[in-house]
Image: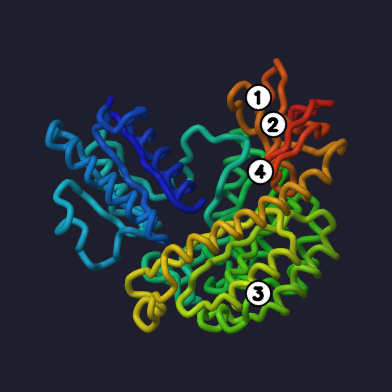
Amino acid sequence: MPGYYIWTIGCQMNKAESERLGGYLEWLGYEPVSRPQDADLVLMNTCVVRGNAEQRVLGELAYLAGLKKRSPRMAVAVTGCFVDPGSGEMQRRFSQVNLSFPAGKFAEFAQWARERGNGKRADAGQLALSVARPSPAAFVPVIQGCNNYCSYCIVPYRRGREHSRPLAEVVAEVKALVRRGVREVTLLGQNVNAYGRDLPESADLAGLLARLNDVEELERIRFLTSHPRDVSLEFIEAVASLDKVCEFMSLPLQSGDDSVLRKMRRDYTVEEYRRLAEALRSRVPGIGLSTDVIVGFPGETEEEFQHTVMAIRDLRFDTVHVAAYSPRPGTLAQRTMADDVPQEEKERRLRLIEGLQEGIAREVNRGLLGRRVEVLVERRNKGKWEGRTRSNKLVFFADAADRTGDLACVEVTSASPWSLQGELVSAARVGVR
């Protein structure tokens, strides 16, 4: 049997798409291998949202060029945001690449892989539902692309404008995953709250969540990522009313300064964001809030940066993903704004935010000491069982039995900024109890 190897970096959407592509390859008769040098087909699923991610992609491409010289039979395919749709640049720049295709556009890959595999007929529907070896928690893409064109972001140029999957198709996929043992799904989109706006049918994210809330044996539903502008009070009420929707939201702030937000083209103010966070915490008690922040955006002054520091200190997020600004080719910021914050200053600001958030997360997580939390167990990791609470806290506990897929009641015995440790109180096999 031919072997395949998938190299993935970047967002959860990339991870979800790699799972589907891997599952499709196995349906065609490929088998997974643990090293690229043992593969007949190597698939790279790439990211260029940040400059360091792009450098990792270039490094892997260079490595694969060396492998192909020693093993010419190897085929290399590249997808993800490194691929510039319609430019044809990939094969011109990288002779080691046999096929490149835009993120989320699988038809050409399906035909190409079929021809290289065992001759099974290419089936787009099979690819849409393929997931290799699903765990108790699975990602389900529901909308591709973004219409916002934030000034720093390359995603709309690489994934295109918003394109939603039909509601019935998403529901069918979730039901199929549940039949295979999945108990939690995370609905994915670059702007997931825009789901359904482009569909001819009457559909939106709240309606999709309500439909999935009725799926038997599905225990939990998550969604990400949300744009603050598109999270209404009506949507919050809908989420609060659905018992399977987890108390967690990823809500990127990006900056705590209104002037910087305007240059970023984010279309909300810091005060509007604060009111939204307050509404979420009031209506959904115990909700975990995650955010993204960019430091060193063009023209960002020390005073503007300190506004971000104050916002993080005041809002007390559970998780903050912070990145130093790096210009992305073709974006508005790259074309019209000078990248004028020195790199060492960007790194200083990044480290300051990281240190601040570490202290906040430590205090927040210590508040759970002695409490019992519900954990969906996903996997074994370094001798302990690993899973997440409904508010997305990572939890580890020890037990001799196989707990994969269990809903475990765990008493928290220690807490760090990044995870909780606990002792098993009780567990039930989900869908069997």
To which residue does mark 4 refer?
418
Residue under the point 70% across and 17% down = 401
Image position, residue 156 (x, y; %): 42, 70
Q: What is the x, y in percent for residue 365? A: 77, 45
Q: Nearer the viewer, mark 1 or mark 3?
A: 3
Query: In the image, which disc is placed on residue 307?
Result: 3
Q: What residue did someone put label 1 on?
A: 384
Which of marks 3 and 4 precedes in the sequence? 3
Front-most of residues 300 and 226 = 300
Label 1, label 3: how far apart the Cα atoms are: 40 Å
Inter-mark Cα distance, 3 to 2: 35 Å
The residue that disc 2 covers is 396
| Quarter in which the N terminus is drawn | top left
Marks 2 and 1: in contact by CB < 8 Å? yes
Gap in Å between the C-alphas at discs 1 and 2? Answer: 6 Å
User: Looking at this view, is 37 or 367 the one in front?
Assistant: 367
* Disc 3 residue crowd, few under 14, some 14–19, many 20+, Cα 10 Å: some
Q: Mark 4 is on which residue type?
A: Trp
> Which element carries disc 2, helix, strand or loop?
strand
Label 2 crowd (10 A; few <14 / some 14-19 / many >=20):
many
Cα gap from disc 4 to disc 1, whole angstroms: 16 Å
Q: Amino acid at mark 1?
A: Lys
Q: Are marks 1 and 3 in contact (CB under 8 Å)?
A: no
Residue 259, quarter of picture: bottom right
